[in-house]
Every structure is written in structure tokens, then in C-alpha cells.
Image (cartoon, grey):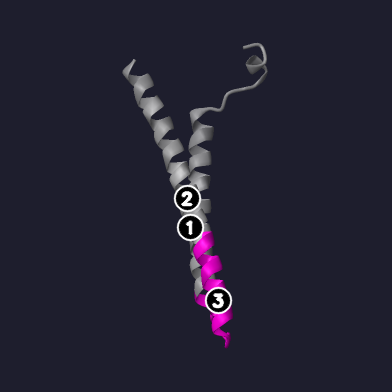
């Protein structure tokens, strides 16, 4: 507890701002992936290059989905704690 007393806890406002920024960032990433997907095949002749780019973008998109899922789970825990605290 002595070590923890050195650190200031975040306020609910700061947590809300982080949540809002995270959502904006995830949407921006999803939009960027979509844009890359539309641009990836322009002017490409090789089927191998197209296949490679598609696979890379699929991997990146899957990774973003996993990050979003983790974020949603973390946020759900926070919301549950707030609700439990209000009940008490």
C-alpha cells in the first residue's frame, strides 16, 4: 500500500477519455485497413502479389478484431465494477 500511495489513481473522466480515444483509434485503424484493401490490388499484375497482400491484410484485420475484443472485455469489467459500486 505504501508503494501504491505514490501513484495517483485515474479519474472516471480520464478513463472515459481513454475509452473514447481507443474507440476512435480502432475505427481509424479499421478504415485504414479498408482503404489499404481497396488500394492493394491497383496496378498489380501478379496473382502471387495479390494473394500475399490479401493474406497480410487479413492477418492485420484479424489482429485488430482480437484487440477490439480484448478492449471490449476490459471495458465490460470496468462497467460491471461501476455498477457494482453504485449498488453498494
Residue stretch rendered in magenta on the structure:
38-60
Q: Which residue is mark 3?
A: 40
| Viewport quadrant of the C terminus | top left
Q: Earlier in the sequence, mark 2 or mark 3?
A: 3
In this rendering, the answer to whether 40 lies above or below 20 is below
Residue 75 - label? none
Task: Name the residue: 54% across, 83% down.
Answer: 47
Task: Name the residue: 62% across, 12% down.
Answer: 1
Q: Are marks 2 and 1 in contact (CB under 8 Å)?
A: yes
Q: Which residue is mark 1?
A: 62
* Residue 9 place in picture, x, y as percent: 58, 23
Q: Which residue is mark 2?
A: 66
Residue lying furthest front: 48
Q: Earlier in the sequence, mark 1 or mark 3?
A: 3
* Residue 48 place in picture, x, y as percent: 57, 80
Task: Name the residue: 48% across, 44% down.
Answer: 20
Q: Quadrant of residue 87?
A: top left
Q: Nearer the viewer, residue 20 or 76?
A: 76
Amino acid at each position: 500500500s505504501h508503494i501504491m500511495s505514490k501513484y495517483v489513481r485515474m479519474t472516471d473522466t480520464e478513463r472515459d477519455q481513454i475509452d473514447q480515444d481507443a474507440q476512435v483509434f480502432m475505427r481509424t485503424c479499421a478504415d485504414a485497413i479498408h482503404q489499404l484493401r481497396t488500394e492493394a490490388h491497383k496496378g498489380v499484375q501478379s496473382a502471387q502479389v495479390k494473394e500475399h497482400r490479401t493474406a497480410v491484410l487479413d492477418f492485420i484485420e484479424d489482429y485488430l478484431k482480437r484487440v477490439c475484443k480484448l478492449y471490449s472485455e476490459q471495458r465490460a469489467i470496468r462497467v460491471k465494477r461501476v455498477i457494482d459500486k453504485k449498488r453498494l
